[in-house]
Amino acid sequence: MLRADLYEKSIPINTYISSSDFKACGFHTREEFLNKLRSGQLKPSHCKIARKRFLSLLWAAKPDEVLPEIEVLQLPNPGPTGLFPINQPKKDSPILVSGNSKLTGEVLTAILSTTLSPFWYLVVDTDGHTVDMAIVYEVLTAERVMQILAREKADQIAPESTLFLPGFAAMIRDNLAEQSGRSVKVGPVCAAELPVFFGNKHWKLA
């Protein structure tokens, strides 16, 4: 099987590892800690940091631990669109924006299964394209996000929620913020970065 590129190498793992992280695992440098983490030889029991923190760093450093194997497809594979609740979200829970590629959905479902934290999952009609290709073909736009927000009555059920765009969609952030009147932030390119991006406070591990 020819695996799809899930952009694991885009994760800036060094920016997330603090000196207290690698020292708690008995290492003198960030590089030593990261090499051991990526080798698969380092376990939570070897470190004096919380297991949740360890796992979020592990998944960012070694994404294949949490990402499913996705086959490269030549054609778009559209799935359903809508605003889907994850873990009983409230009116101010974060809204994760993505496209309606079934492959993207499979990846995000795997990542979201690791958390007990509440989120809204907004699936925009991108004609079945993955996010990277949706930007290329200009089918992940502020206008399309606004259409699905209106259709799903997001202003009523999640009026205080911040929108989190996938990293590839950074170019539509300002336009979307202006049109929606919401806070709009740019998240990671690779889904495996989400746990460490949100941190232990906002990504409670299952």
Image: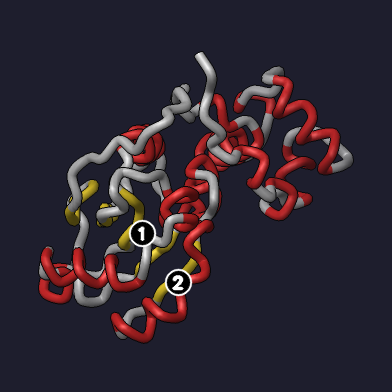
Q: Secondary structure at mark 1?
A: loop
Please state which amino acid type lies under the numbered disc 1.
Answer: Val
Residue toward you, 1 or 16 = 1
Q: How is the image coloured?
A: secondary structure
**Which residue is the site of mark 2?**
172
Residue 75 position in % (x across, y down): 37, 34
Residue 116 position in % (x across, y down): 31, 43
**Which residue is the site of mark 1?**
139
Residue 121 position in % (x across, y down): 27, 53
Apparent side of residue 57 relative to residue 151 in the rendered image (left or right): right
Residue 35 position in % (x across, y down): 79, 30
Specify few, some or many for label 1: CA neighbours under 10 Å numbering under 14, 14-19, or 20 or more: many
Q: Upstream in the sequence, badge 2 or badge 1? A: 1
Residue toward you, 184 or 34 = 184
Specify few, some or many for label 2: CA neighbours under 10 Å numbering under 14, 14-19, or 20 or more: some
Q: To which quarter of the image does residue 137 belong?
A: bottom left
Please state which amino acid type lies under the numbered disc 2.
Answer: Ile
- Above or below — where is 165 with respect to 133? below
Give the numbered dot on residue 160: none
- Above or below — where is 125 with respect to 113? below
**Of labels 2 and 1, the one closer to you:** 1
Apparent side of residue 10 relative to residue 32 in the rendered image (left or right): left
Residue drawn 53% across the image and 36% down it:
6
Residue toward you, 14 or 45 = 14
Apparent side of residue 58 relative to residue 76 in the rendered image (left or right): right
Q: Which quadrant is home to the C terminus?
A: top left
Q: Is residue 114 visible?
A: no
